[in-house]
Amino acid sequence: MNSSRIELFSFFNDARWNETGGGVEFGVAIGEYRGVVRVPRRTFQQLLAGPVTPKSCLEAFYFNRSAFERAAETKLRAHQLTDDGNIELNTRDLEMA
């Protein structure tokens, strides 16, 4: 990224449960980059006191949305992408956000 210009992150209002991947996903964009942020069920197991269901994970995401977005932004700035060019967040990422 060019440090002389401001890059704005866009987070889409498209959070959803991915049954195949077993977690919450939401879209992110910055400049030409478009990707998916994945938060696996195991991350929510460490965050939630009660049952870990798709509904409870999505509720936790929306309740703490800014922390998830900050964590995703940090990983993008550090170019910490998965092999498929997306982002996966874990509990440590969220604690650091």
Image: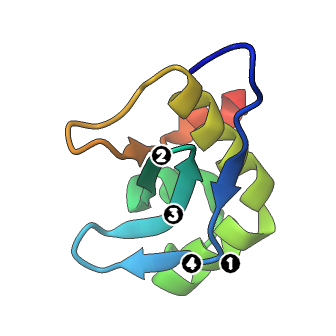
- Label 3 to label 2: alpha-carbon separation: 13 Å
Give coordinates of residue 47: x percent, y percent.
62, 53
Q: Is residue 86 left or right of residue 20?
A: right
Relative to 50, is 89 above or below? above
Q: Earlier in the sequence, mark 4 or mark 1?
A: 4
Which type of secondary structure does the marked residue at label 4 adopt?
loop
Give coordinates of residue 95: x percent, y percent.
68, 33
Q: Residue at x 55, y 56 (%)?
A: 28
Q: Can you tell which of label 4 and label 1 is closer to the viewer? A: 4
Q: Quadrant of the N terminus?
A: top right
- Label 1 to label 2: alpha-carbon separation: 30 Å
Q: Residue furthest top?
A: 3
- Label 1 to label 3: alpha-carbon separation: 17 Å
Q: Crowding at label 4, few (<14), some or many (≥20) Cα neighbours within 10 Å?
A: few
Residue 53 showing in the rendered view: no
> For mark 2, what is the residue?
32
> For mark 4, what is the residue?
14
